[in-house]
Image (cartoon, rainbow, N blue to C red):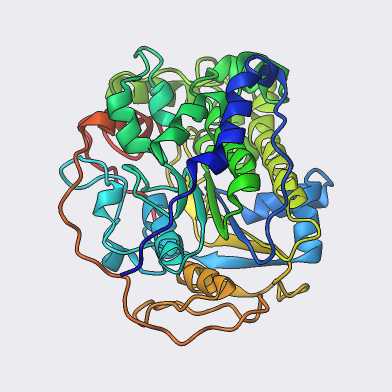
Amino acid sequence: MHVMKKPSPVSLLPIFLMLSLGGCSLESRWTPPAGIVQSGGVVVLGIDGLDRVLLESLVRQGQLPAFARVMQQGVVADMAVGQPILSPRIWTTVASGYGPETHGILDWVRPDGRPFRAGDVAVRRVWDAAGDAGKTVLVSGWLMTTPVSEVNGVMLGDEVVLRGSLDMDPNLEPMRDPAVVDGWLAWPKSTLDQVEGWMPGARWQSEHDLAYQLASYGALLHPLRRDETHVRSFEALQPDLQPDLSMIYLSGADQLSHQYWPFSDAGGVRAMQADPGLRMRSAQQLSAMHRGKRSLPLSDRPTDAAALAEGGRWIPDYYRYLDSVLARFMSRMEGSSGTLIICSDHGFRVGDRPVPLFADHRDPAVLMAWGGRVKPGGSRQARVSMLDVAPTIDALLGIPSAVDMPGRVLTELFDVRALPRQGTRVETVPGAQPGAPSDHPRRQQLEALGYIEGNGRPIPQPR
């Protein structure tokens, strides 16, 4: 039986000491330890809701130089995700190579209103398989990782920042019971002690290009805080841990697009121009339907020309932040043979619902790649499946995929060879994990994004 190697507390100590002693110096400027991704390392950057159409439009305008470089030097392809387009089912498929009918994550919440948890995932994911093969992993923020599991490296659960601020509900006090938090959010537990040091402080946020969004949305509720924390977890831990596989998930583009996509869509703009009070009335109706709702910026007044101009900045400006994040990841891979994979789970559209308050998901998503094992100039017209990502990661790591994983290795995009497949990664779920400690903040967020009703029941999503 393979015994999974645990990271040495001694090896991580210099980073932890540096962060804990940094104090207010981290407040206005983040200076992570220097480090290059090791030879052959694979970094997967999952960006929820990244829309290829808007992305390429902003690239053509010269606004996203890092994404432009990936497109010029690497590969980009549409990635089919199928119906229904729901983030937890898609990201669990990306991380496992199995479809929802096998891995068991079908939606955000079960029919009884309980949010799905990591303990409901019925398969071993790619980081588990990598650890079994002796590879070191770093997983930060990936969906369905709460409660965290023991890995051959470090895992920060997807609610590590959510539980710190109780997102979407500014009237509740943060939950800070170490006995509860330590067991749910980070492995090894000592890592959790440093998360607060990685969270951006008030001065950093006030000086950021998105400060205008933070001021009106609420700094604790805006997704910048969560995304930046998970980016910093990679930057802080990667030099010493040197993971063979890193998987970092960012949710901000999705959260903001749900609420502000109509401002970046010609049809949504026309609807608001024709009826400046429509968005405000829609917000009032939503607030009356769902308990504890707060009014979103640009939803508490008529949508005049000034509001349209401001709203039109929200998503493009967040894409520019994501471009700066991508540049930070790429800087750690310069000169190495490491491979960077960037993927989303869906795009966005103003759908059949005539209310310009929320946007709907659209298929396909996008997959991009850059680095040592990528075939430059790979077909821009290639169309891949969400089932193909995990087998391709396996091949890049030099480990066999399971015989019952339906996807394929993307040999047309990567310089890689698939190994003969072995066994299965399907396992019996021992039973539902307890949900009470973190159900409340997750349900608050899902209500605010229009996924569930006030009683916790799922809202059918448009197809």
- Answer yes or no: is residue 298 visible: yes
Q: Position of residue 95 (x, y in %)?
A: 44, 60
Q: Residue furthest front?
A: 10
Residue 283 position (above or below residue 188): above
Q: Is residue 206 left or right of residue 171?
A: right
| Residue closest to the eye, 206 or 452 | 206
Q: Position of residue 260 (x, y in %)?
A: 56, 33
| Residue closest to the eye, 105 or 437 | 437
The residue drawn where x is 15% and y is 43% is 112
Q: Is residue 267 left or right of residue 150?
A: right
Looking at the rendered image, the quarter that the C terminus falls into is bottom left
| Residue closest to the eye, 9 or 176 | 9
Q: Is residue 104 left or right of residue 236?
A: left
Q: Residue furthest bottom?
A: 420
Q: How many marks?
A: 0
Q: Residue furthest right?
A: 62
Residue 370 position (above or below residue 66): below
The residue drawn where x is 50% and y is 36% is 255
The residue drawn where x is 15% and y is 52% is 431
- Answer yes or no: is residue 167 visible: no
| Residue closest to the eye, 54 or 108 | 108
Residue 58 position (above or below residue 230): below
Q: Position of residue 89 (x, y in %)?
A: 36, 56
Looking at the rendered image, the quarter that the N terminus falls into is bottom left
